[in-house]
Amino acid sequence: MTDLPDFRSIQRRQARSGRVDYIPPVEIHDTARSRIELLTYLIPRTNGTDVSLKFVRYDKRRTGMVAAAEISFDAAAGRRLLKALKEHEAVAADGSEGSYIVISVEEGTVQIGELDPRVIASAVAGILGEDEIVRHLADLDLPREMVTAFRGAIRIRELRTALAILRQHLDDGVGDEQTYQDWCEEHSWAFGNAYVVNDRIRAISRADKVDLLLPRALGGFRDLIELKRPDKSILVYDAAHQNHYFTADVSKAIGQCHRYLDVLDEDARHGLRDAPEVVAYHPRATIVIGRSDGWSDLEHRALHGLNSRLAGISVMTYDHLLAQGQSTVDLLSNPPPEEMILPSFNESNSSHDGAWFGDEEPF
C-alpha cells in the first residue's frame, strides 16, 4: 500500500488585541512531568509580515498544567533559529563525521555532498571577493572538479562584470574612443569564440596602426577590429529610393579598413617583419560604431543586407557587441548537454561574414 502524504491543517487566528494574528500552539515535547509548546505570532508590517516565536514549558501537576518558563524570539531571532535547524538537519542527514559547508538554494538547504560543484561555486563566488577565492583555492586541497567549478564561476562573474562596465559606459554617453579601445583590448572574448586572445601589436606598417589584431582560433591568422565612437550615426534613409545607406562616418571607416586590409595582406602574409608570428591570410575587418538599441526591424535588416554586400568588412554596433558578449556568458553559464554541443568553428564557416559568435551573426 502506498504511503499517503502527511496533511495537516494550520489555522491563522486574530489575537484578542486585534493587532496581531497567531497560529494555535504546536506540541514540541511531551513527557510525564512537562510539556513544551510553540506559539507563532504573525505581526503585520507595511512591507510584509514579521514572525515572532515563543516556546512555553508547562509543568504537569495534579491540578493541571502550569506555565513554568517562556522563551521568546523576535522576527530576526526566529529566522536565525529556523535557519540553524535546517542547516543542522542537513548535516544530520549525511550521517558521517567531518566539516560541512551548508548552502541555501532554491530547493532547500542541503549539505555540500548533495550539490553539483558548479552550484556550490556560483553560490560561494557571490559571497566572497574574487581575489579572496583565488588565494584560498591555491591553499585548499579540493577535488579537481571543485577547483574547476570555482574557476569557472569566477570567470563568468568577471565576464558579467565586464559587460556591465561596457553597458554603463554606453548608457552614460561616454564618447571617448580610448575608453572602448581599453575595454576591447582587455575583453576581446566579446568578439566571439572564433578568436583567441588579441595581439598586443597594433602597428602593421610604419604609417598604419590598427585598433585590435585578433588571431583566429583556427590557424591563428589575424583579423582586425576598428573602433569608432558609439555616438556616431550608421544608417541614413533615402526616401526617394526607399533604402538605407551608410553614413559618411561609416564610409570613411570602411575606406580606412580597406587600406589596412591591403597592407596587412601584403606585409603580413608571411608574418610581420618585426613580429613573424603575426600572419594574415585573407584578413577580415570588423568596424564597431554607433548604437542600435532603438532600431526598428527595418534598420536591423538594412545593416544585415549592407554587410552581406561588403567583401571582407562588416559593420556592427556597440549594442551588437554587448549582445554577442552576453551570448558568450549565457553559453558558459548554461552549457548545453554534451551530446548537443557542436563544433562552433570549422573550415566550412571560416569565411563567414562579420564578427560572429558560433554559427550565427548577432545582427
Image (cartoon, grey):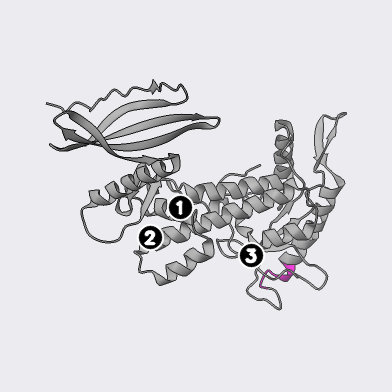
Which of pointers 2 and 1 lies earlier in the amino acid sequence? 1
What residue is rendered at 71% in x and 48% in y? 318
Q: Nearer the viewer, residue 206 or 177?
A: 177
Instruction: Report if the CB atoms under discs 3 and 2 are less than 8 Å apart.
Output: no
Magenta stretch, residue numbers? 266-271
Please give left or right for residue 199 compared with residue 334 in the image: right
Amino acid at the residue labelled 2: Met
Crowd band around label 1 with a 10 angstrom C-alpha radius: few (<14), some (14–19), many (20+):
some
The CA distance from mark 2 to mark 1 is: 11 Å
Amino acid at the residue labelled 1: Ser
Identify the mark at residue 198; answer none if there is no mark. 3
What SS does tag 3 mark?
loop
Tally of marks: 3
Q: Nearer the viewer, residue 214 or 85?
A: 85
Q: Is residue 270 magenta?
A: yes
The CA distance from mark 3 to mark 2 is: 29 Å
Q: Position of residue 243 (x, y in %)?
A: 80, 33
Q: Which residue is mark 2?
A: 146
Crowd band around label 3 with a 10 angstrom C-alpha radius: few (<14), some (14–19), many (20+):
many
What SS does tag 2 mark?
helix
Q: Which residue is mark 1?
A: 122
| Dominant secondary structure (helix, strand or loop) of the stretch shown in magenta | loop
Quarter of the figure that contains the C terminus: top right
- Residue 215 found in image quarter: bottom right
What residue is rendered at 13% in x and 30% in y? 62
Amino acid at the residue labelled 3: Asn
